[in-house]
Image: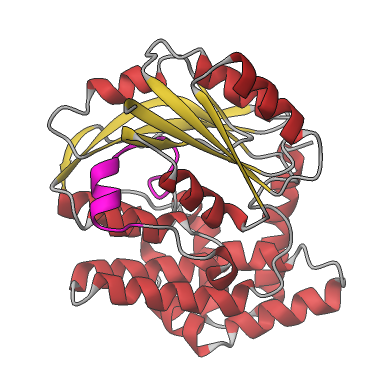
Amino acid sequence: MSVTISAIVPVYNGQDYIEKCLDSILNQTFTDFDVIVVNDGSTDNTSKIISKYQKIDDRVKVISQANQGLSGARNTGISHSNGHFIVFIDGDDWIDKDMFKALLDKANGSELVACSYYREFSGMSLVRKFSIEGMLEKEDYLSLLVCPINQGKADPSELDIFGTVWGKLFHSSIIRDKSITFLPYGEIGSNEDLPFNLQYARHIKNAFIIDSPYLHYRRDNESSLTSGYKPLLSEQFPKLHNYVYNLLGNHTKLLELYDYRVAFNLIGLGLNELRNPKGFFSRYKAIDKILNNSHYSKSLRKAPINKMNLKWKVLFFSAKHKLTPIVYLLLRTISLILKFRNS
């Protein structure tokens, strides 16, 4: 039997978080929905916890599978969903009780609805503001997805504020009719949300942005499906970049914006290398290799440094000119700040 919304919840070793996630969904003020929980090979008590929820609430459907990563888990959820709309909620996050209602209230006449969110650190909660609200035409929404730097966003750390799949209401008919899926996580290493969002956005006419937070994005879960050191990330990212370049075709403006995004990926790539357990020399060597890689250096030469504030200007100027010691120190500083937030 079809429902209005299918909520897809991928989870891996989420015993410390999944109850809060599911409680927040089941306590929604809007009630015509089901919950597809995809247990992606958990080895802790996650299975027992979600089985309990399935027994006490018939809106909960549990799918268990061998570990396939976040992309595989979400794709499984899509294939088992039967809602007119789909929302994605990661198993370590949670939502406010009015989120479904707020998204649905703006769904009439719009083919996608997105709300802002909270970033939840161990010691603080920070609201991520969009600084934009209302109906957007397709081209404007695509620009925000690819890179919001030309929309008054001079902070590269805000690169993906529009690019997540959670906090959004998707039409399931578009996803199914256009065969939209998440790229295999093992091929692209990270950032699987962007190509999914771009595939979807190509087939819509408009999107509605709500600049009010309804989702809580946990930033302190080291066992999540997206945490940990990824030794192949700098080699996998070019595959993602080439896929997106092909997806954007001959759209000059979006291709230019995506060049900016590739340059800004230096932050994520560098922070990933700082997690390398082999120590300083391996980390330094890896960051130096990234700066001297033609794929990244080409985009760094195009980075809109003049549109950044001072702290980012120093980082990207140094990266552009391959000043590895300065880049390393600045990335290390960013890493320490993030650790402090989570302490």
Q: Which one is in front, 289 or 190?
A: 190
Residue drawn at point x = 36 percent, y = 70 percent: 244
Residue drawn at point x = 51 percent, y = 52 percent: 157
Q: Is residue 293 above or below residue 331?
A: below
User: Is residue 173 in the magenta section?
Assistant: yes
Residue 78 placement (x, y as % from top left): 42, 46
Report the magenta residues as a range: 161-180
Residue drawn at point x = 43 percent, y = 74 percent: 241
Q: Which one is in front, 216 or 26?
A: 26
Q: Is residue 343 above or below residue 249?
A: above
Residue 75 placement (x, y as % from top left): 47, 52
Asked if residue 155 lies left or right of residue 168, the reply is right
In which quadrant of the rendered image does the C terminus lie? top right
Colouring of the image:
secondary structure
Residue drawn at point x = 44 percent, y = 58 percent: 182
In which quadrant of the rendered image does the N terminus lie? top left
Q: Which one is in front, 167 or 19?
A: 19
Res. 187 image quadrant = bottom right
Asked if residue 148 lies left or right of residue 236, the reply is left
Residue 136 placement (x, y as % from top left): 17, 41
Q: Which one is in front, 14 or 250?
A: 14
Which residue is outermost to the front?
Answer: 1
- Is there any visible trace of residue 128 in the rendered image? no
Residue 37 placement (x, y as % from top left): 56, 35
User: Is residue 128 in the magenta section?
Assistant: no
Q: Is residue 150 above or below residue 293?
A: above
